[in-house]
Amino acid sequence: MEAAIIKIGNSKGLRLSKTILEKYNIQDKVQLILEDDQIILRPIDEPRKGWEKAFKKMNAQGEDKLLMDSVFEDETINEWN
C-alpha cells in the first residue's frame, strides 16, 4: 500500500484511512519503531492499563516500599540545596 505524506501546519504527517484505524484499533497514539530501513507503527492499546489496580494490590499487601533510601550514606540532603 502506498500513502502520501501531507502538510499539517509547519510539519508533515501521514494520513491513515478510517478502515485502517478501525482494523488495527488505532485510537489516539501509536508506537513508532525505527528499524534499519523501515518505520513500524504499532497501536498503543492503553498505556499503563491496569496500573491503578496493581498499585492498590501492592499497597494492600505492603509491597509498595522504597527500594533504596532517598539519601545515600555518603551524601546529605544539604548537598542538593
Image (spheres, grey):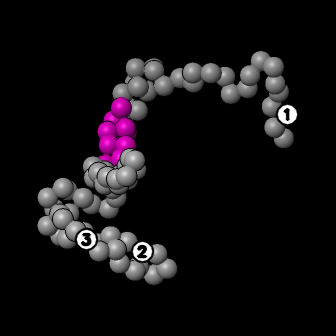
* 3 or 1: tag closer to the N-terminus: 3
* Mark 3 residue type: Ala
Tell me the residue at 18%/55% (across/down). 24
Foreground tag (3 vs 1): 3
Disc number for residue 12: 2
> At which x and y percent is residue 75?
81, 24
Q: Residue at x 40, y 32 (%)?
A: 55
* Dot placed on the residue nearer the N-terminal end, 2 or 3: 3
Cβ atoms under marks 1 and 2 closer than 8 Å:
no
Mark 2–mark 3 distance (CA, rounded to whole Å): 13 Å
Taking depth in this image into account, of 50 and 1 the one nearest to the observer is 1
Residue at point 57% right, 24% down? 66
Residue 5 placement: quadrant: bottom left
**Against 3, is 43 above or below?**
above
Q: CA distance from mark 3 to mark 1?
A: 55 Å
19 sits to left or right of 74 = left
Residue that numbered label 3 is attached to: 3
- Under tag 3, what secondary structure? loop
The kind of residue tagged 2 is Lys
Instruction: Give yes or no for residue 68 being in the magenta stretch.
Output: no
Please give the residue where the numbered disc 1 appears in the rendered image. 79
Badge 1 crowding class, 10 Å Cα cut-off, few under 14, some 14 to 19, many 20 or more, is few
The count of marks equals: 3
Q: Are marks 2 and 3 in contact (CB under 8 Å)?
A: no
Q: Secondary structure at mark 2?
A: strand
Residue range (magenta):
46-54
The CA distance from mark 1 to mark 2 is 46 Å
Tell me the SS state at disc 1.
helix
Answer few, some or many: residues within 10 Å of disc 3's Cα (few below 14, many 20 plus, some between 14 and 19): few
**Residue 31 location, x and y as percent?**
36, 51
Task: Tell me the amino acid under the disc marked 1.
Answer: Glu
